[in-house]
Image: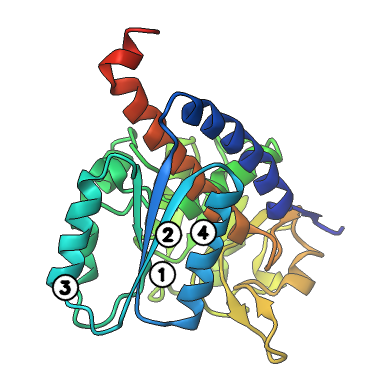
Protein backbone atom coordinates (compact mmCIF):
# COMPACT_ATOMS: atom_id res chain seq x y z
CA UNK A 1 0.00 0.00 0.00
CA UNK A 2 1.29 3.44 -0.94
CA UNK A 3 -0.23 6.45 0.77
CA UNK A 4 -2.22 9.10 -1.05
CA UNK A 5 -0.36 12.41 -1.03
CA UNK A 6 -2.17 15.40 0.45
CA UNK A 7 -1.07 18.18 -1.89
CA UNK A 8 -0.84 21.35 0.18
CA UNK A 9 0.22 23.43 -2.81
CA UNK A 10 -2.91 22.54 -4.80
CA UNK A 11 -5.23 23.00 -1.83
CA UNK A 12 -3.61 26.37 -1.10
CA UNK A 13 -4.29 27.52 -4.65
CA UNK A 14 -7.96 26.66 -4.27
CA UNK A 15 -8.27 28.48 -0.96
CA UNK A 16 -6.36 31.51 -2.21
CA UNK A 17 -8.74 31.82 -5.16
CA UNK A 18 -11.56 32.22 -2.63
CA UNK A 19 -9.50 34.78 -0.68
CA UNK A 20 -8.93 36.78 -3.88
CA UNK A 21 -12.64 36.82 -4.67
CA UNK A 22 -13.67 37.92 -1.19
CA UNK A 23 -10.85 40.47 -0.95
CA UNK A 24 -11.94 42.02 -4.24
CA UNK A 25 -15.50 42.33 -2.92
CA UNK A 26 -14.25 44.17 0.17
CA UNK A 27 -11.93 46.39 -1.89
CA UNK A 28 -14.88 47.39 -4.06
CA UNK A 29 -16.51 48.75 -0.91
CA UNK A 30 -13.36 50.58 0.18
CA UNK A 31 -12.34 47.99 2.78
CA UNK A 32 -9.39 46.14 1.22
CA UNK A 33 -7.86 43.69 3.72
CA UNK A 34 -4.48 44.86 5.02
CA UNK A 35 -1.59 43.00 6.67
CA UNK A 36 1.49 44.51 8.31
CA UNK A 37 4.56 42.27 8.60
CA UNK A 38 7.44 43.29 10.88
CA UNK A 39 10.90 41.78 10.60
CA UNK A 40 13.57 42.60 13.18
CA UNK A 41 17.06 41.48 12.23
CA UNK A 42 18.43 39.79 9.11
CA UNK A 43 17.89 36.06 9.62
CA UNK A 44 17.98 34.49 6.13
CA UNK A 45 15.16 32.09 6.99
CA UNK A 46 12.98 34.87 8.38
CA UNK A 47 13.62 37.00 5.31
CA UNK A 48 12.39 34.17 3.09
CA UNK A 49 9.29 33.69 5.25
CA UNK A 50 8.28 37.35 5.24
CA UNK A 51 8.98 37.69 1.51
CA UNK A 52 6.66 34.76 0.80
CA UNK A 53 3.97 36.22 3.03
CA UNK A 54 4.11 39.62 1.37
CA UNK A 55 4.06 38.07 -2.11
CA UNK A 56 1.04 35.96 -1.17
CA UNK A 57 -0.75 39.15 -0.11
CA UNK A 58 0.12 40.94 -3.34
CA UNK A 59 -1.01 37.99 -5.46
CA UNK A 60 -4.38 37.68 -3.73
CA UNK A 61 -5.69 41.19 -3.30
CA UNK A 62 -4.49 41.86 0.24
CA UNK A 63 -2.78 45.19 0.95
CA UNK A 64 0.56 44.57 2.67
CA UNK A 65 3.20 46.58 4.49
CA UNK A 66 6.64 45.10 5.22
CA UNK A 67 8.66 46.88 7.89
CA UNK A 68 12.29 45.84 8.38
CA UNK A 69 14.37 46.90 11.36
CA UNK A 70 17.95 46.32 12.49
CA UNK A 71 18.67 43.55 14.99
CA UNK A 72 19.58 46.12 17.66
CA UNK A 73 16.09 47.65 17.66
CA UNK A 74 14.89 48.28 21.20
CA UNK A 75 11.86 46.59 22.67
CA UNK A 76 10.30 49.99 23.41
CA UNK A 77 10.66 51.08 19.78
CA UNK A 78 9.02 47.88 18.52
CA UNK A 79 6.15 48.21 20.99
CA UNK A 80 5.59 51.80 19.89
CA UNK A 81 5.50 50.76 16.24
CA UNK A 82 2.91 48.07 17.04
CA UNK A 83 0.82 50.67 18.88
CA UNK A 84 0.79 52.81 15.72
CA UNK A 85 -0.29 49.85 13.58
CA UNK A 86 -3.01 48.97 16.10
CA UNK A 87 -4.53 52.41 15.35
CA UNK A 88 -4.11 52.18 11.56
CA UNK A 89 -7.51 51.60 9.96
CA UNK A 90 -5.94 50.18 6.78
CA UNK A 91 -4.28 47.38 8.74
CA UNK A 92 -6.46 44.42 9.76
CA UNK A 93 -3.68 42.02 10.70
CA UNK A 94 -0.28 42.46 12.35
CA UNK A 95 2.42 39.80 12.21
CA UNK A 96 5.78 40.07 13.95
CA UNK A 97 8.14 37.46 12.53
CA UNK A 98 9.65 35.19 15.17
CA UNK A 99 12.19 34.61 16.57
CA UNK A 100 13.11 38.07 17.85
CA UNK A 101 16.53 39.30 19.03
CA UNK A 102 17.33 38.50 22.68
CA UNK A 103 16.76 42.04 23.96
CA UNK A 104 13.08 41.83 22.96
CA UNK A 105 10.52 39.85 24.96
CA UNK A 106 8.46 37.97 22.35
CA UNK A 107 5.60 37.40 24.79
CA UNK A 108 5.34 41.12 25.51
CA UNK A 109 5.36 41.89 21.80
CA UNK A 110 2.61 39.38 21.03
CA UNK A 111 0.46 40.77 23.83
CA UNK A 112 0.94 44.31 22.48
CA UNK A 113 -0.81 43.41 19.23
CA UNK A 114 -4.53 44.23 19.37
CA UNK A 115 -6.40 40.95 19.76
CA UNK A 116 -8.62 41.76 16.78
CA UNK A 117 -5.50 42.14 14.61
CA UNK A 118 -3.65 39.09 15.97
CA UNK A 119 -3.92 37.04 12.77
CA UNK A 120 -1.27 34.61 14.02
CA UNK A 121 -3.66 33.67 16.84
CA UNK A 122 -0.92 33.83 19.50
CA UNK A 123 -2.37 36.54 21.80
CA UNK A 124 -3.41 35.24 25.22
CA UNK A 125 -7.01 36.29 24.67
CA UNK A 126 -7.16 34.44 21.35
CA UNK A 127 -5.51 31.38 22.89
CA UNK A 128 -8.16 31.47 25.61
CA UNK A 129 -10.97 31.76 23.07
CA UNK A 130 -9.54 28.77 21.24
CA UNK A 131 -9.50 26.81 24.49
CA UNK A 132 -13.18 27.56 25.07
CA UNK A 133 -14.13 26.51 21.55
CA UNK A 134 -14.93 30.00 20.23
CA UNK A 135 -11.74 31.15 18.50
CA UNK A 136 -11.47 34.59 16.98
CA UNK A 137 -8.40 33.44 15.03
CA UNK A 138 -7.08 29.91 14.69
CA UNK A 139 -3.26 29.72 14.58
CA UNK A 140 -2.31 29.39 10.93
CA UNK A 141 -0.50 26.06 10.83
CA UNK A 142 -3.04 24.07 12.90
CA UNK A 143 -5.84 25.74 10.94
CA UNK A 144 -4.17 24.60 7.72
CA UNK A 145 -3.89 21.04 9.02
CA UNK A 146 -7.63 20.96 9.72
CA UNK A 147 -8.30 22.17 6.18
CA UNK A 148 -6.12 19.36 4.85
CA UNK A 149 -8.12 16.78 6.80
CA UNK A 150 -11.29 18.37 5.46
CA UNK A 151 -9.94 18.18 1.90
CA UNK A 152 -9.67 14.38 2.05
CA UNK A 153 -13.11 14.18 3.67
CA UNK A 154 -11.63 12.46 6.70
CA UNK A 155 -13.99 11.77 9.58
CA UNK A 156 -12.19 13.33 12.54
CA UNK A 157 -15.02 12.72 14.99
CA UNK A 158 -14.28 9.56 16.95
CA UNK A 159 -10.75 9.18 15.56
CA UNK A 160 -7.69 8.89 17.79
CA UNK A 161 -5.35 11.78 17.01
CA UNK A 162 -1.78 11.89 18.31
CA UNK A 163 0.11 15.19 18.21
CA UNK A 164 3.89 14.95 18.58
CA UNK A 165 5.15 18.31 19.82
CA UNK A 166 3.57 20.62 22.38
CA UNK A 167 4.53 24.13 21.30
CA UNK A 168 2.21 27.12 21.71
CA UNK A 169 2.46 27.72 17.96
CA UNK A 170 1.48 24.27 16.66
CA UNK A 171 1.16 21.40 19.11
CA UNK A 172 -1.16 22.83 21.75
CA UNK A 173 -3.57 24.65 19.40
CA UNK A 174 -3.55 21.64 17.06
CA UNK A 175 -4.68 19.44 19.92
CA UNK A 176 -7.46 21.91 20.77
CA UNK A 177 -8.76 22.03 17.20
CA UNK A 178 -8.75 18.24 16.89
CA UNK A 179 -10.50 17.93 20.24
CA UNK A 180 -13.17 20.41 19.15
CA UNK A 181 -13.67 18.37 15.97
CA UNK A 182 -14.51 15.33 18.09
CA UNK A 183 -11.23 13.43 18.11
CA UNK A 184 -9.72 11.69 21.10
CA UNK A 185 -6.37 13.44 21.45
CA UNK A 186 -2.99 12.40 22.86
CA UNK A 187 -0.19 14.99 23.07
CA UNK A 188 3.42 13.80 23.15
CA UNK A 189 6.45 15.90 24.02
CA UNK A 190 10.19 15.56 24.51
CA UNK A 191 9.61 13.82 27.86
CA UNK A 192 7.24 11.18 26.47
CA UNK A 193 8.33 7.61 27.19
CA UNK A 194 8.17 5.16 24.29
CA UNK A 195 6.94 7.57 21.64
CA UNK A 196 6.24 4.76 19.21
CA UNK A 197 3.75 3.18 21.63
CA UNK A 198 1.58 6.27 21.25
CA UNK A 199 2.11 7.00 17.55
CA UNK A 200 1.20 3.44 16.55
CA UNK A 201 -2.27 4.01 18.01
CA UNK A 202 -2.94 7.13 15.94
CA UNK A 203 -5.58 7.30 13.24
CA UNK A 204 -4.36 10.86 12.69
CA UNK A 205 -0.70 11.59 13.42
CA UNK A 206 0.51 15.21 13.44
CA UNK A 207 4.27 15.62 13.91
CA UNK A 208 5.68 19.05 14.77
CA UNK A 209 9.03 18.79 16.54
CA UNK A 210 11.68 20.14 14.17
CA UNK A 211 13.60 16.86 14.53
CA UNK A 212 14.35 15.00 11.31
CA UNK A 213 13.03 11.43 11.07
CA UNK A 214 11.73 11.41 14.63
CA UNK A 215 8.86 9.28 13.31
CA UNK A 216 9.79 6.22 11.26
CA UNK A 217 7.62 3.79 9.32
CA UNK A 218 7.46 1.24 12.15
CA UNK A 219 5.92 3.91 14.39
CA UNK A 220 2.90 4.42 12.13
CA UNK A 221 -0.42 2.58 12.23
CA UNK A 222 -1.21 1.09 8.80
CA UNK A 223 -3.64 3.35 6.96
CA UNK A 224 -3.16 6.35 9.27
CA UNK A 225 -3.25 9.97 8.13
CA UNK A 226 0.23 11.43 8.69
CA UNK A 227 0.63 15.20 8.74
CA UNK A 228 4.28 16.31 8.79
CA UNK A 229 4.68 19.88 10.05
CA UNK A 230 8.48 19.68 10.37
CA UNK A 231 10.94 21.63 8.26
CA UNK A 232 14.52 20.36 8.30
CA UNK A 233 17.46 19.70 5.97
CA UNK A 234 18.74 16.27 4.99
CA UNK A 235 22.35 15.23 4.35
CA UNK A 236 22.11 16.69 0.84
CA UNK A 237 20.78 20.01 2.20
CA UNK A 238 17.33 19.33 0.77
CA UNK A 239 14.18 20.22 2.69
CA UNK A 240 12.63 17.36 4.62
CA UNK A 241 10.19 16.92 7.48
CA UNK A 242 10.04 15.19 10.84
CA UNK A 243 8.77 11.94 9.31
CA UNK A 244 10.81 9.42 7.31
CA UNK A 245 8.66 10.10 4.25
CA UNK A 246 10.12 7.53 1.84
CA UNK A 247 9.30 4.62 4.11
CA UNK A 248 6.29 6.09 5.92
CA UNK A 249 4.34 6.50 2.69
CA UNK A 250 4.40 2.72 2.28
CA UNK A 251 2.48 2.34 5.56
CA UNK A 252 0.24 5.40 5.88
CA UNK A 253 -3.09 5.86 4.15
CA UNK A 254 -2.55 9.58 3.56
CA UNK A 255 0.61 11.63 4.05
CA UNK A 256 1.82 15.19 3.51
CA UNK A 257 5.13 15.81 1.74
CA UNK A 258 7.85 18.27 2.70
CA UNK A 259 8.04 20.60 0.87
CA UNK A 260 4.61 21.05 -0.70
CA UNK A 261 2.50 19.96 2.25
CA UNK A 262 1.72 22.00 5.34
CA UNK A 263 4.07 24.88 4.44
CA UNK A 264 1.92 26.50 1.73
CA UNK A 265 -1.15 26.05 3.93
CA UNK A 266 0.35 28.10 6.77
CA UNK A 267 0.69 31.21 4.61
CA UNK A 268 -2.71 30.61 3.05
CA UNK A 269 -4.42 30.51 6.43
CA UNK A 270 -2.65 33.76 7.34
CA UNK A 271 -4.41 35.30 4.33
CA UNK A 272 -7.70 33.75 5.43
CA UNK A 273 -7.33 35.14 8.96
CA UNK A 274 -6.50 38.60 7.62
CA UNK A 275 -9.49 38.46 5.28
CA UNK A 276 -11.79 37.39 8.12
CA UNK A 277 -10.48 40.25 10.29
CA UNK A 278 -11.27 42.71 7.49
CA UNK A 279 -14.74 41.22 6.98
CA UNK A 280 -15.50 41.51 10.69
CA UNK A 281 -14.31 45.11 10.73
CA UNK A 282 -16.37 45.99 7.66
CA UNK A 283 -19.47 44.33 9.07
CA UNK A 284 -19.14 46.37 12.27
CA UNK A 285 -19.21 49.69 10.41
CA UNK A 286 -22.61 51.39 10.91
CA UNK A 287 -22.95 52.47 7.26
CA UNK A 288 -22.24 48.92 6.04
CA UNK A 289 -24.47 47.25 8.59
CA UNK A 290 -27.36 49.53 7.58
CA UNK A 291 -27.11 48.29 3.98
CA UNK A 292 -27.42 44.63 4.96
Say the numbered circle drawn on residue 53. Answer: 4
- What residue does disc 1 label? 189
Asked which secondary structure carries label 3, the reply is helix
Residue 264: image quadrant is bottom right
SS at badge 2: helix
Q: Between 264 and 214, which is closer to the camera in this rendering?
A: 264
Tell which tag, 3 or 1, sits nearer the viewer: 3
Name the one closer to the observer, 193 or 22: 22
For mark 4, give the secondary structure. Answer: helix
Dot 1: what SS?
Answer: loop
Give the mark, 2 or 4, whose residue is nearer the N terminus.
Answer: 4
Query: Residue, x 41% and y 82% (percent of image)?
Result: 42
**Residue ID at (44%, 74%):** 193
Q: Which residue is mark 2?
A: 171
Q: According to the image, label 3 marks what residue?
A: 75
Mark pair 3, 1: CA separation: 31 Å
Amino acid sequence: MTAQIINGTLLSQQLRADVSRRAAALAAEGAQPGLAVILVGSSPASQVYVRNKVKACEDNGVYSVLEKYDADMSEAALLERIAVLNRDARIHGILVQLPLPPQIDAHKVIEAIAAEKDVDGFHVSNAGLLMTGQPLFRPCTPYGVMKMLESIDYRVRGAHAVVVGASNIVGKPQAMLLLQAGATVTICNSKTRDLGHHTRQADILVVATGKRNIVTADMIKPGAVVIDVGMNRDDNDKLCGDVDFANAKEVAGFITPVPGGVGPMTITMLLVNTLEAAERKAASQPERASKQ
